[in-house]
Amino acid sequence: MVRLNANYYKLAAGYLFPEITRRTKKFLEQNPDVKLMKLGIGNTTEPLTKTVIEGLHQGVKKLANVETYTGYGEYHGEMPIRTALQSFYKKRNVDIDVEEFFVSDGAKPDSGNIQSIFCTDSKVAVQDPAYPVYVDTNVIAGRSGEFNEDKKLYEGIYYMPCTENNGFIPDPPCEKMDLIYLCSPNNPTGAVATKKQLKRFVDYAIAHQALIIFDAAYSAFIRDPDLPRSIYEVDDAKKCAIEINSFSKSSGFTGVRLGWTIVPFALAIENVNAGDVHKFWMRRQSTFFNGPSNIIQEGGVAALSDQGWKECQQLVDYYMNNAQTILEGLSRMGLTAYGGVNAPYVWLKTPNQMSSWDFFNKLLSETHVVGTPGSGFGPSGEGFFRLSAFGHADDIQRAVQSIQDNLRL
Ligand SMILES: *Cc1c(COP(=O)(O)O)cnc(C)c1O
């Protein structure tokens, strides 16, 4: 008899984004003339840059010619994209072997799939709040108990609270964990870990034979030159950390699809030889994945070229201007907000200790702006609200203006 994977039943029913869609739709049914302004989902809106488009065209052209046509390629990406990534890291004084890169169809699949090479009874720690993929994929894999409706968390998962008190960067766990997910710059809080803060996690991981899964999808948004863009800027991180990154947010590849994961050969975990984690991930990828698209890889190489990256940085600047617009608007109103300086998310403290969902309703009905309730990212997100800087600048300005004019505090 075929049975479903019962772990799916554990996934919390009111999943964040469908619930936002449901409430938004209901509001529009009751107020059909309203034009909503969306600062909700972290989706890019600006077109690909000139150099990237040329790279993609180049990729298409190669397929039209028998001399340059390619079929299946390497499971972890062709040499040009891996050497381009190697040079990209070299600029930050980080040395990565070309064979340590696994180029993929994105950071979401990688951050979701990576858990599959670790045993089912691994103990998992996550930042709270966090990008939902880390928790949900571990729930599906059977590494949690049930969802606790009172505490709004899964039993068996270790939550590291990210609060105003710790600047939204948690301390390492106080007990022994196996897999630790870190995201910096952080979605949803916009907080960025310093080298010193990351070093504490690296030291913890080495002392406790744990492994860090570091999601750096927003590294291109860091403006402060002293903040680490890669965990490998921290000594010894290659012994204990996997890094995941993506072209999605830096280069507008959300729909194009290209990302990468670094699994260092030096990674050594409990009872496992150095190199085995790398072998396992290669085995996983070669079994379930046939390599990233050849056309898209050309776009990725173009994005990493000097001119391409300059253009991508202009895209990033565009969104970071939006972040500044949001931050300034909110602070003029006397609201408390975090993030938005080295990350494209603003983490607003709800006024008058409103719950995240109550504030969602208030913002929607009074200002016609849609955002994301912080509680949807974990229990410590309660009382906070995420505003995304992705969007056309004039839409963002209209939204901020509407909040200033119409939000009743
Ligand atoms: C957007 C995002 C990603 C990117 O995922 P892709 O699959 O590469 O589009 C990864 N991690 C976090 C935290 C994100 O917010």
Image (tube, grey):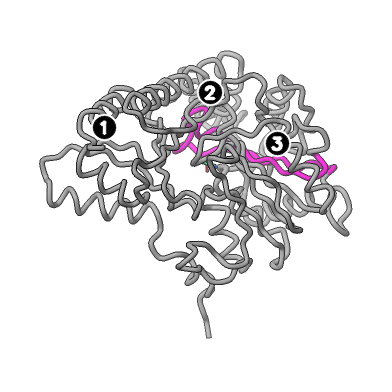
Cα–Cα span, label 1 and label 3: 35 Å
Residue located 62% across and 51% down the image:
160
Query: How many callouts does the rendering have?
Result: 3
Residue located 34% across and 52% down the image:
357
Along the viewing direction, whichever of 263 and 181 lies nearer the viewer: 181
Q: Label 3 near label 1: C-beta < 8 Å?
A: no
Left or right: residue 144 compared with residue 197: left
Please tell me whether residue 266 is drawn above or below residue 144 in the rendered image. Answer: above
> Can you identify the residue that label 1 sits on?
403
Residue 202, x across and y down, in percent? 77, 42
The amino acid marked with disc number 3 is Gln
**In the image, which disc is placed on residue 197?**
3
* Magenta-drawn stretch contains 392: no
Residue 83 visible in the snapshot: yes
Left or right: residue 99 compared with residue 221: right
Which one is earlier in the sequence, the residue at label 1 or at label 3? 3
> Can you identify the residue that label 2 sits on?
55
Residue 288, x across and y down, in percent? 63, 56
* Magenta-drawn stretch contains 248: yes
Crowdedness near tag 2: few (<14), some (14–19) or many (≥20) residues, C-alpha within 10 Å:
many
Residue 228, x across and y down, in percent? 68, 28
Confirm if mark 1 falls within 8 A of ligand 1. no
Cα–Cα span, label 2 and label 1: 41 Å
Residue 22, x across and y down, in percent? 27, 55
Left or right: residue 265 compared with residue 372: right
User: Which range is magenta?
Assistant: 238-266
SS category of the residue bearing label 3: helix
